[in-house]
Amino acid sequence: MKITTQVVTPQDAKLLSREVVSDEARLRLTRLLRVWPDRRDLEVGIVFVNRIVNIARAPMGLPVYVLDSGGEEYYAPVEHAWHQGELELAMRRPSTAKLAEALVDLAAARLVDVDDVNEVLAQDGVSFSLVEDEGTFGDIVVSLRVTSDTEIEAAAVDDAHPNIRHLINRMETLITQDDWPGVLHTSAMVFETLAKVVVNLASVENQTLASFFDRYRKDSKLPSPLLDYILEIYKRRNVEPLAGHGQTAAPTVTKEEALLLAELTRVAVRLERSLSEQDTAKGSRSASPANAAAAAIAKQPPAPNAPTSTPAASLSAASAAVPPSVAPERTK
């Protein structure tokens, strides 16, 4: 049955420019390609390797290498050496976008199995995968499925406790209404609900966050500086006009603070869940992005003329420490 491919769109390429495929995953993908020379006679295997090499080089704009024995019965050792070297580079050299495009073409040529590739990509936690669908004329179409940033964030929040999802939706509504104290109030409620989900004890259900925060700190997977920030935001909620209690004073929380707070609230929910899953799977979070965030928070200098213990100072530090959503593209 004929197999065709659906090209990687410019939008997909833009999304993939922010994605990083680990060296370990690239090695596992390389192992999927090594079966071609390993399981065949060298003089036959090099023909398949040549096709793999040219398919992998094409998205990078590299020239096609024509395999030519020069009329001899066997290919020269230098040909085998060059092709083996290029085979090892095929999955390591491309940027993420070019790697994804090459994988689509390799799968369409039946040189890699879609399920094998997707298993590697899923274990690496990247945002793209290969898809096989039946085409209009009964052929099989291999295409790329790229999950957008919005879909990733929505999925993480959708998996949270129903009350947390409800509060985050409320927070989004308050942002559209320019209700910045309301955003602060709702964010504090998200943190309190999140803490009760993590602690998971009936005895804390009717308690305030401050009253059982030490227990939450013990059970949480979040780095300590981020937990300090959460507690300070909760305390600020209690004194901020229109955020905790009725007051005649004007609120001090700004639009910029509220928007940043909303984003950090979503980050905290996602991190708590992902770190918990990582801790369960690996028994360690030593390589977690959140630890890098923790180190960055801890190294943040205090804001000029501002006490380091204030929520505003913590807000600036925490925002600087959030792992960037744009990762540098791998060097070609």
Image (spheres, rainbow, N blue to C red):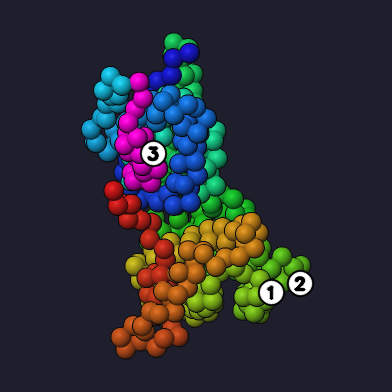
Which element carries disc 1, helix, strand or loop?
loop
Q: CA distance from mark 1 to mark 3?
A: 64 Å
| Three-letter residue code for mark 1 | Gln
Percent position of residue 11, x then y: 32, 39
What residue is shown with label 2? 203
| Three-letter residue code for mark 2 | Ser
User: Relative to 25, is 254 on the left or the right?
Assistant: left
User: How many residues crowd around disc 3 within 10 Å: few (fewer than 14), some, or many (20 or more)?
Assistant: some
Q: Which mark is residue 207?
A: 1
Percent position of residue 57, x then y: 30, 35
Is 77 a magenta residue?
yes
Q: Disc 1 vs disc 2: Cβ atoms closer than 8 Å?
A: yes
Towards the viewer: 16 or 195: 16
Q: Residue at x 62, y 69 (%)?
A: 220
What residue is shown with label 3? 84
Which element carries disc 2, helix, strand or loop?
helix
Is 284 a magenta residue?
no
Q: CA distance from mark 3 to mark 2?
A: 63 Å
Magenta range is 73-94
Q: Residue at x 40, y 51 (%)?
A: 20
Towards the viewer: 165 or 198: 198
